[in-house]
Amino acid sequence: MTTYETMPFHLETERLILRPWTLSDAEEFSALLAERGKEKSPVERIRSAIGELLAATRTTGIALLPVQRRDEGDFIGYCGLITGRSTLEEPEIAYELFRRAHGQGYATEAARAVLGAAAATGRKRLWPTVGTWNTPSLRVLEKLGFEQDRVTTEEEAGEVAWLVRPLP
C-alpha cells in the first residue's frame, strides 16, 4: 500500500482561507446544511459531526475544510477531500457554499487550492461525484480540468456523474 503525505490543513488563496474546523463553526455549518431544504440540525449534533470530521482527518490525513472569505472573515462553506463514494488513495474533492456566495468564483478558487493540496500528498487522481442536475458544480469541475468518466443511478441521489482528473 502506498503511503501519502498529510494534506496541508491551512490553505490560502487571493480571497479565501481554508482552515481546520472549530466547534464554533457549528451554527454556520448547520445553516449551510439547512439550505439543502431539510430541517436545520441541532447545533449539538453538528458539533458532534465536526468532532467526527476532525477524528477522520487525524486518521486519513485528508480533510474537508471550512472556507471563509479573507477580507470579511465570514464562513461561506467548505471544500476539501473526502472518501465519499471513492477511496483514500483516489479521494473525492467536495465543496458546498452558501447560496449567497454562489456565482462569484469562490468554489473554483477553493477547489483549485485543494487540488494543489491533494497533489502535494502524492496522490495521482481525484474522483468527484455530483448530481447530474447540479450544472454549477459540473461547471466548476470542468474549469478545473475534470472530465466525466461515467454516470450511475442511486436510489437516494438519482443520476450521479463521476468525474476524474489526474494530478500533476
Image (cartoon, rainbow, N blue to C red):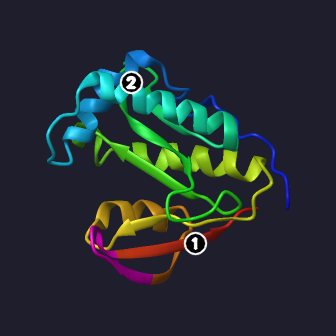
Decide: is 114 above or below 31: below
Q: Are marks 2 and 1 in contact (CB under 8 Å)?
A: no
Q: Residue at x 45, y 66 (%)?
A: 129
Q: Which residue is mark 1?
A: 164
The answer to whether residue 124 is left or right of residue 85 is right
Closest to the observer, 111 or 66:
66
Closest to the observer, 55 or 128:
55
Q: Residue at x 47, y 52 (%)?
A: 94
Q: Give the residue type that dot 2 points to.
A: Arg
Which label's residue is closer to the chain start, 2 or 1?
Answer: 2
In terms of secondary structure, where does tag 2 sit?
helix
Asked if residue 12 shows in the view, the reply is no
Asked if residue 13 shows in the view, the reply is yes
Q: Which residue is mark 2?
A: 47
Decide: is 97 above or below 139: above
Q: Position of residue 51 (x, y in %)?
A: 49, 27
Q: Position of residue 2 (x, y in %)?
A: 85, 59
The quadrant where residue 57 appears: top right
Closest to the observer, 73 or 78:
78
For label 1, the crowd category at 10 Å Cα-Cα, with few meaning under 14, some 14 to 19 and many 20 or more, is: many
Q: Which residues are magenta?
A: 151-159
For the C terminus, which image quadrant?
bottom right
Q: Give the residue type that dot 1 points to.
A: Val
For the N terminus, which image quadrant?
bottom right
Q: Position of residue 95 (x, y in %)?
A: 43, 48
